[in-house]
Image: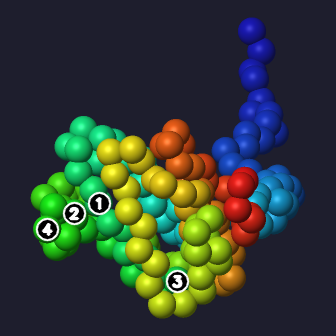
Amino acid sequence: MGDTSHGSRITSHGFTLLELLVVVAILSLTAALVFPRLPSTETGALRSSARGVSAMLRYLGEQAITTKSVYRLHLEPGGTGLMVMKRLASGDEVPPSDTLLTKPQLASGITIRDVETGRLGRVTGGEVLVDVGPGGLADLLVIHLQGKGGENYTVAAYPASGKVKVASGYQEAGI
């Protein structure tokens, strides 16, 4: 058969500059749309703190019922103080032996903006003492947490039922 000539067939083993530019443009557009929707770490810390306080309040109520003990919650509105103490029959307070009740609940930079109870109303400073006994909370308890950037989360604990709700933002009592 005849002599085959070497054709001028060009094989491509890479991407053209135009293809690369299209991919970069698509990735840039996707990043521009997705990035603003990602939660900030500060908001995550605030949400995590609110959920931690909520879980601690539920657990505290369960512990009070199962051990037939009275616990006192020390809250510091305007600060970062949140501490649980076990009340003895003598009236003295001792730290609880349960490590879940002694660990810090608030992340760094998260403060208690204010505390609301049915008996005291809204308290923005000082110290609020809340007793949790075998019958649960005696009164509605609303704790407003605030992050460094001014974002808020609300934790509401309801008397008798032991139900605790967490809501984004500053919610008034009875959420």
Q: Which residue is mark 4?
A: 90
Left or right of 171, for residue 65: left
**Residue 71 numbered mark, or none:** 1
Camera-side residue of 21 and 105: 105
Please, what secondary structure does the residue beneath circle 2 have? strand
Q: Where's residue 114, x and y in %?
A: 60, 79
Q: Please, what is the three-letter code of the amino acid marked with disc 2?
A: Lys
- The one nearer the camera, 166 or 126, is 126
Q: Which mark is residue 77?
A: 3
CA gap, disc 1 to disc 3?
Answer: 19 Å
Q: Earlier in the sequence, mark 1 or mark 3?
A: 1
Residue displayed at 81% across by 65% down: 32
The kind of secondary structure element at disc 1 is strand
Q: Earlier in the sequence, mark 4 or mark 1?
A: 1
Q: Inspect the image, locate mark 1, and give the three-letter code of the amino acid beneath it.
A: Tyr
Is residue 43 shown to the viewer in this render?
Answer: no
Give coordinates of residue 175: x percent, y percent: 72, 53
**Which residue is farthest front?**
90
> Mark 2 — residue?
86
**Badge nearest the viewer, 2 or 4:** 4
Q: Dot 1, crowdedness within 10 Å: few (<14), some or many (≥20)?
A: many
